[in-house]
Image (cartoon, grey):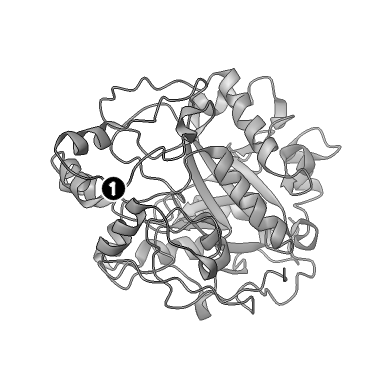
Amino acid sequence: MPTRDTQTPPATAARMAPTAITTPATSRQPRAKWATRLALTCPLLLLLTALPCTSAQDLGGDGDLRLNQIQVIGSHNSYHIAPEPELLKMIALSGQRVADSIDYTHPSLTDQLTQGLRQFELDIYADPTGGRFAAPLGYQMLRDAGKDPQYVPNPDGKLDRPGLKIIHEPNFDYATRNETFLDALQEIDNWSAQNPDHLPILVLVELKEKSAVASPVKLLPFDQEQLQQVDTEIRQAISPSRLLTPDDLRGDFDTLREALQTRGWPKLVDCRGKIFFALDNEGALMERYLADHPSLRGRAMLASVAPEHPAAAFRKLNDPERQFEEIQRSVRAGLIVRTRADANTTQARNNDPTQRDQALATGAQFVSTDYWNADPRLSSYQVRFSQDRFARRNPLVQPEEKQ
């Protein structure tokens, strides 16, 4: 039975096995052969236990709280499954640090939501004709070497179909919980429909046009047609009643900046059950997204722009140590900010909470991590608020302040 978003995550929940899960952990069934093998061989995988909703996201009553006056924890590369051991060995030939930086596995989006996370990051590649990413180089190399790959891409042919694909890197770091953008968004929307009082969910979308290695696959740029495809798939997958867009935030004002400075962000009570999106990219690609869409009119995503920009609403400031004061200025100015508690598995390997503690202290509303559950292979490092919560009132801005 759907309940208000007041869930307590299990304090000892650990990372999920790389199985193609689309339902909560309490109802998992045996999966494909590759997933079973991976579950048996990966040392970090324990059973995730989802508890009934209780108090983890009870903010003491919404009252006059606005969307920018909360702070929540979310995941980085939310779809990611670590390359299997034999593939990691190949990757390590180019540098052990490279292999270490991608050796993390996340549970399904549904399980993350059930635990209490309310922010995702999805990396997408353009594939307008389909099939571009159906046979990754690393997978072919494993087979050529006589190995039996544990992760088999494209098991149901979804990679053969036209549309945006979710991959971290298409040649070697290709294992993913959701192969298509539409699948991921539909999974989020389905969970939202079943839990209509949840805190708002932010989905960051990074558009990938290049690979970190020389690629036999020709990667396509996000031209205006493909940028429109991103918006189209968002609107196709997310129910209009749940989608919060830049146009919704702007209302009758000329610009987003004016709307938020004058009227402020929506009250939390009015945007529970909502899902909103932000473009992770900056620079030329962001400018392409803004082109012919003043103040993001007609667009589905916010963009990370300077505070004085007419479309100012969101900023991506990923370094809370170097950018601490800039993040706090942006939050106090009424912007929503995303920052990161850790990167490249470094903080977990060193059991170093410095960046995490700075990130939480900045007041950034969305703090991304790969370790909301500790990885027992590495250390006890994890990112949570007190009492194992993943959401709280923002420590920097409160309702009495004009936002």
Report crowding for label 1: few under 14, some 14 to 19, many 20 or more residues within 10 A (C-alpha).
Answer: many
Camera sees residue 279: no
Front residue of this view, candidates 177 and 68: 177
Instruction: Check the picture and name the quadrant holding the C terminus.
Output: bottom right
In the displayed structure, does residue 199 sit left or right of residue 45?
Answer: right
Q: Residue at x 80, y 58 (%)?
A: 270
Q: Secondary structure at mark 1?
A: loop
Label 1 belongs to which residue? 83
Q: Residue at x 49, y 65 (%)?
A: 28
Q: Is residue 308 above or below residue 366?
A: above
Camera sees residue 183: yes
Q: Residue at x 72, y 39 (%)?
A: 246
In the displayed structure, does residue 7 sit left or right of residue 42?
Answer: right
Q: Is residue 341 above or below residue 235?
A: below
Front residue of this view, candidates 267 and 380: 380
Mark count: 1
> Where in the figure is residue 288, as x and y percent of width and height?
57, 22
> Where in the figure is residue 98, as x and y percent of width and height?
23, 45
- Residue reaching furthest to the right: 252
Amino acid at pointer 1:
Pro
Instruction: Check the picture and name the quadrant holding the N terminus.
Output: bottom right
> Where in the figure is residue 303, as x and y percent of width and height?
60, 37
In the displayed structure, does residue 154 sit left or right of residue 333?
Answer: left
> Where in the figure is residue 261, as x and y percent of width and height?
75, 46
In the displayed structure, does residue 27 sit left or right of residue 61?
Answer: left
Front residue of this view, candidates 8 and 354: 8
